[in-house]
Amino acid sequence: MSARDQDLREIRDAVAKLCASFPMEYWRALDRERKYPTEFVRALTAAGWLSCLIPESYGGAGLGLRAAAAVLEEVQKSGANGAACHAQMYTMGTVLRHCSEAQKRAILPKLASGELRLQAFGVTEPTAGTDTSSIRTAAVRKGDRWVVNGQKVWTSRAEHSDLMLLLARTTPREQVAKRTDGLSIFLVDMKAALGKGLSIRPIRTMINHATTEVFFEDLEIPADNLVGEEGKGFRYVLDGMNAERILIGAECIGDAKWFIERASAYARERRVFGRPIGQNQGVQFPIARAYMAMRAAELMVERAAALYEEGAPCGPEANMAKQLAAEASWQAGDMCLQTHGGFGFAEEYDVERKFRETRLYQVAPVSTNLVLCYLAEHVLELPRSY
Ligand SMILES: Cc1cc2nc3c(=O)[nH]c(=O)nc-3n(C[C@H](O)[C@H](O)[C@H](O)COP(=O)(O)OP(=O)(O)OC[C@H]3O[C@@H](n4cnc5c(N)ncnc54)[C@H](O)[C@@H]3O)c2cc1C
């Protein structure tokens, strides 16, 4: 269902109200100790926001991507970090389109109620990197089961998820016509698999992101857990990407708004040389520039989300939305830190935390160069460079 502007405003207000009950001290303490925001994710789930994309017939709110984008933007704009749970929205791109009716009936109502969490998406591998077709994690069919061996890296939230969507090779690369053929997606019951062929090792990073390495050693998965058709997994991942890019774009817009609001407030209050620092054009102009960049990127995010909801092709817009928004949030973050001077580095101002957090979106889920490669090849018809 496509949301009206009035509905979107109401969604934003409700999400902002929920986020206000998780003050900056909460996020600061979690960041310091690299802890997962369990209470926040529970509250967002209980209020139905994390399942807003799940159709009503499966217990969700049945809203469209613009509504989901509004939820995530508002979370980031409040100073929170939605990366703790945003995958429950991204994974819907694959689940709603490609899971069987039986699979949907088994998981969607439980995801909507919060009984189950689907927060982990295992695609990236240490040796393949951006070249997804080179992944080595393999699933081999043995009777009524698949046996999985291999390793994933950067599988975020794996320790806080009941289910994982896993991309694995089911036909060796040498035996397929196209290197992107022969990959398949599986639903993995992580709680059942832990210690029985699945192990997880956390990776400490510069942000509080609960990211991990995941190892598969003769892990057995029921044959029924294959998603869609065998060998079509790469296409299924691509299908989900536009939604993911648009949602990340919305998160970056939320971050940029937070930085701009914080910087403006500080520039109005902080007095040096007997006047507010914001009276100096050298301080005002970077804030105004960051605001312009954010507003321009916001238009592209809105355009991409509207196209997606109409069911129209939106690959270029989704990629541009993610990239422009990630650049705008980084520009705003850099400006905000500079506006705060030394205090930008102090933990208690939260600027340094958000500065670190928003940097991720120029690397994950897709890095800047790969977005540029996409536009060069698919929009500008330049030769493929890789
Ligand atoms: C905190 C965090 C969380 C993540 N969460 C997840 C997750 O939940 N699930 C998941 O599957 N993955 C996840 N990722 C992985 C993320 O999607 C990848 O890091 C990202 O896609 C880049 O891949 P890579 O790190 O292997 O870089 P590489 O592929 O090694 O690339 C390194 C650099 O080289 C550049 N490069 C590579 N090839 C080319 C080329 N042909 N032309 C130009 N430049 C090129 C890239 O742009 C990049 O800047 C996460 C990563 C991080 C850091």
Image (spheres, rainbow, N blue to C red):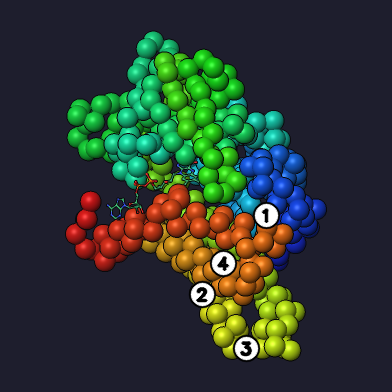
Tell me which amino acid carries mark 3.
Asn
Residue 135: assigned label: none
Label 2's element? helix
Please tell me which residue is depicted at 61% across the width and 60% down the height of the picture. 352
Pointer 3 with pointer 2, Cβ within 8 A? no
Tell me which amino acid carries mark 1.
Ala
Q: Left or right: where does residue 4 sit relative to residue 24?
A: left
Instruction: Tell me which label, 4 or 3, sits earlier in the chain.
Output: 3
Picture layout, residue 103 above or below residue 133 = above
Label 1's element? loop
Q: Could you give the CA–CA distance between mark 2 and mark 4, rounded to whole angstroms? A: 12 Å
Numbered disc in front, either 2 or 4: 4
Q: Residues within 10 Å of mark 2 (few under 14, many from 20)?
A: many
Give the residue number, with chain letter if any, for mark 2.
Answer: 293
- Residue 141 seen in the figure: yes
Q: Could you give the CA–CA distance between mark 3 and mark 1, rounded to whole angstroms? A: 30 Å
Give the residue number, with chain letter if any, for mark 4.
Answer: 333
Give the residue number, with chain letter if any, for mark 1.
Answer: 80
Please tell me which residue is depicted at 64% across the width and 72% down the height of the picture. 340
